[in-house]
């Protein structure tokens, strides 16, 4: 080996060691940097001349366990879901108050019950009547306060959906932009390694809000999908969440698959191919903070409100319902008369009939609803009894019309007096 060949080999070795030292230095310096992945130099032997050889650094490799990374993203999504659930449910507990403390719904109910018991033993005493009335008013106020608190939480969740959608969109756009910058770069290019670190961080951020499944193709492009198969990011293209807030929600602001009937914010996703999908109707997300917000807004907090409504309705019914005994009739009745003039909001009329077509006995509960915003009443599929809301003050014509509309296709029809209700 000549002197020049020996010097060339020595210089190549020094350059290779210098590159390796630079990478080791970077690894040490970034040991505490979130998202940084340890790199190792890729070196090859290059033969020069008849006897000599040199070392060449061709790039770097990232020491990354993709299985562990995918598990991390799954856990991040689960953590985002659980944290949001715990946060809102803790606030819901504060709305109810600590059991046994004053100023809570439990306390107001106990005081009202005690006042009624005292009134039952001294109904003629004006003091007992005053206490009972005051306790009833306090309970009504506490029910209203509880409802306000629950709906405030739903409104907060509604607002958080918009914020989460924006954060998810930012992460998806960042991933798509990095995909574009990685096109044309080799997998072992040092600059590609830095970009892939940034992309992994953006994917981790996205997984906080939605569940993600990541695949990487031969051109080093990350394709991201939800577990239900909806594409979030492709090669240089990103989906986009859109959220149209309904503002402050009330107890009657409920989700409906028909946008024209829905009382809550519309949450959609525009896919890279341009099509738009209803996130709620198609169960696009199953984990992450967005999934928690949707579950809270449309299910858990709605159930909490229903429990308060049922408590109020039960107490109202117990204190105001009056059962009037019927009279015996011989032969098929021509109809029945109901006196509804004194009916209060929430009072009901129960109807039981037999569908002769299917030989099935069914029940209808007609509810006096004076607030048009509360209509139509919500019923589970095949509910029995089925609740139908109508303002009794509208007269028999309005009642018959509401019944026919709600029971269309049920083999039952109604007509206002003088024609009686008929079952067909």
Image (cartoon, rainbow, N blue to C red):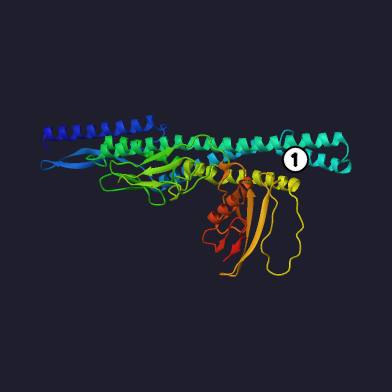
For mark 1, give the secondary structure. helix
Q: Residue at x 39, y 40 (%)?
A: 241
Q: Of 168 and 137, which appears nearest the observer? A: 137
Q: How many marks?
A: 1
Q: Is residue 334 visible?
A: yes
**Is 357 left or right of 340, judged from the image as shown?**
left
Q: Residue at x 56, y 52 (%)?
A: 402
Picture quadrant of residue 359: bottom right
Picture quadrant of residue 333: bottom right
Q: Residue at x 29, y 48 (%)?
A: 217
| Residue 34 drawn at (x, y percent) | 41, 34
Looking at the rendering, in which quadrant would you find the N terminus? top left
- To which residue does mark 1 refer? 109
How crowded pointer 1 is (Cα within 10 Å; few <14, some 14-19, many 20+) is rated as some
| Residue 222 drawn at (x, y percent) | 32, 44
Looking at the rendering, in which quadrant would you find the C terminus? bottom right
| Residue 46 drawn at (x, y percent) | 17, 41
**Is 122 left or right of 48, judged from the image as shown?**
right
| Residue 37 drawn at (x, y percent) | 37, 38
Q: Of 336 and 245, which appears nearest the observer? A: 336
**Is 355 left or right of 136, judged from the image as shown?**
left
Q: Of 195 and 370, which appears nearest the observer? A: 370
């Amino acid at each position: 080996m000549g002197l020049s060949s020996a010097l060339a080999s020595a210089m190549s070795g020094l350059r290779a060691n210098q590159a390796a030292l630079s990478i080791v230095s970077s690894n040490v310096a970034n040991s505490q940097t979130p998202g940084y992945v340890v790199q190792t130099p890729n070196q090859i032997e290059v033969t020069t001349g008849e006897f000599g050889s040199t070392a060449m650094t061709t790039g770097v490799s990232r020491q990354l366990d993709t299985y562990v990374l995918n598990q991390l993203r799954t856990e991040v999504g689960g953590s985002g879901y659980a944290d949001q659930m715990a946060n809102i449910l803790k606030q819901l507990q504060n709305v109810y108050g600590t059991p046994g403390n004053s100023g809570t719904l439990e306390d107001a109910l106990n005081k009202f019950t005690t006042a009624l018991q005292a009134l039952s033993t001294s109904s003629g005493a004006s003091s007992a009547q005053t206490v009972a009335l005051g306790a009833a008013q306090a309970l009504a106020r506490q029910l209203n306060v509880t409802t306000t608190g629950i709906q405030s939480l739903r409104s907060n969740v509604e607002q958080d959906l918009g914020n989460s959608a924006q954060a998810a969109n930012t992460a998806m756009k960042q991933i798509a932009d990095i995909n574009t910058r990685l096109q044309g770069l080799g997998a072992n290019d040092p600059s590609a390694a830095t970009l892939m670190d940034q992309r992994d961080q953006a994917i981790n951020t996205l997984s906080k809000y939605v569940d993600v499944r990541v695949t990487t193709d031969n051109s080093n492009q990350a394709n991201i999908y939800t577990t239900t198969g909806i594409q979030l990011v492709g090669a240089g293209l990103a989906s986009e969440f859109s959220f149209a807030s309904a503002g402050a929600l009330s107890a009657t602001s409920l989700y409906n698959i028909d946008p024209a009937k829905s009382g809550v914010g519309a949450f959609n996703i525009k896919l890279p191919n341009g099509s738009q999908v209803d996130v709620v109707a198609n169960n696009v997300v199953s984990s992450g903070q967005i999934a928690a917000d949707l579950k809270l807004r449309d299910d858990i907090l709605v159930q909490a409100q229903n429990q308060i409504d049922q408590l109020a309705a039960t107490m109202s019914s117990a204190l105001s319902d009056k059962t009037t005994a019927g009279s015996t009739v011989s032969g098929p009745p021509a109809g029945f008369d109901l006196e509804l003039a004194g009916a209060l909001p929430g009072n009901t009329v129960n109807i039981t009939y037999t569908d002769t077509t299917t030989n099935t006995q069914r029940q209808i509960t007609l509810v006096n609803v004076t607030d048009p915003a509360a209509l139509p009443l919500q019923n589970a599929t095949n509910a029995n009894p089925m609740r139908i809301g109508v303002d009794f003050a509208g007269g028999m014509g309005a009642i018959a019309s509401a019944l026919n509309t709600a029971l269309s296709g049920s083999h039952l029809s109604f007509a206002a007096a003088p024609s009686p209700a008929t079952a067909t």
